[in-house]
Amino acid sequence: MNDIFQQGDVYVDDTLKTIYLTPEEPLVYDVNKWDYKQMPSIKSWEQDMRNQLDMHKKQASHHLAFTFPENTLLDKQWLDKIQSYHFELGLMELYAIESQNIKKHKNNQIKVMFVTEQTLEDYITIYRQFAEPYGKAYADENIEVIRNQFNEDSKSRVIAYKEDVPVGILDLIITQYTVEIDGFGVDESYQNRGIGSTMQSFVAEVADTKPVILIADGEDSAKEMYIRQGYIFISYCYQILKENAR
């Protein structure tokens, strides 16, 4: 998980945890959370909840979010306690594949390219479809950040067109050692037409000899697709979220 790109402002970083607190994006859960490096006791976590709530209230964040250490199971006592506080439990799984093992799919009707200032609004059109289910305010806040930070962004944004219509997007975080796929989405009306496979072929070309990594939701059906494509499971971690915290 250490190879996964993490957005957000680091407020505290010590041996026990990293606290991300990003006042410019208060509604974005992943940039306002506590990431544990060592498993806390339930008692200390309960105090951390109160402290996080105070911090989040001051910047108009309305959620609580925690990520637990990599490859650490939560026992029944933890699961019962998490449920009692009405948190949603999620499982993040890290997968990887050697770029040369990604099957190459060519489709002359599909054009895949990096996003430019001229195509940014097309990217945002697709992005909005996947962001708005989390709320219009959330989508608007994220889109404003994408526009404002486009030229200094740590992510390389990618878009796919079918007959000049934008149909898919993904983000790449390209480092010295890996290429990470993030924010992969295909317009629902164009799914199951090989667009995602064509986009992954583009990723393989960009990665060259670097391995490709991604995070999949442990409960998401997309995980099974990645496994069929040859991605290998590497590790996992649990995360919890409580919306509209008081």
Image: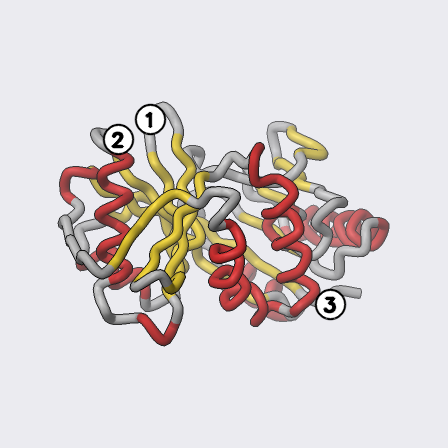
With respect to residue 243, does 108 lie above or below?
A: above
Question: Which quadrant does the C terminus fall into?
Answer: bottom right
- Residue 198: % across, % down: 23, 54
- Residue 146: % across, % down: 59, 47
In this rendering, would 71 be left or right of 77? left
Disc 3 crowd rating (10 Å Cα; few below 14, some 14-19, many 20+) is: few
User: Which is nearer the eye, 243 or 129?
Assistant: 129
- Residue drawn at x 53%, y 47% is 68
- Residue drawn at x 35%, y 61% is 164
Disc 1 on helix, strand or loop? Answer: loop
User: Which is nearer the eye, 6 or 68?
Assistant: 6
Residue that badge 2 annotates: 210
Q: Does the rendering let one see residue 89?
A: no
Residue that badge 1 annotates: 177
Q: Amino acid at mark 1?
A: Tyr
Q: Are marks 1 and 3 in contact (CB under 8 Å)?
A: no
Disc 1 crowd rating (10 Å Cα; few below 14, some 14-19, many 20+) is: few
Disc number for residue 244? 3
- Residue 66: % across, % down: 61, 51
User: Which is nearer the eye, 163 or 151?
Assistant: 163
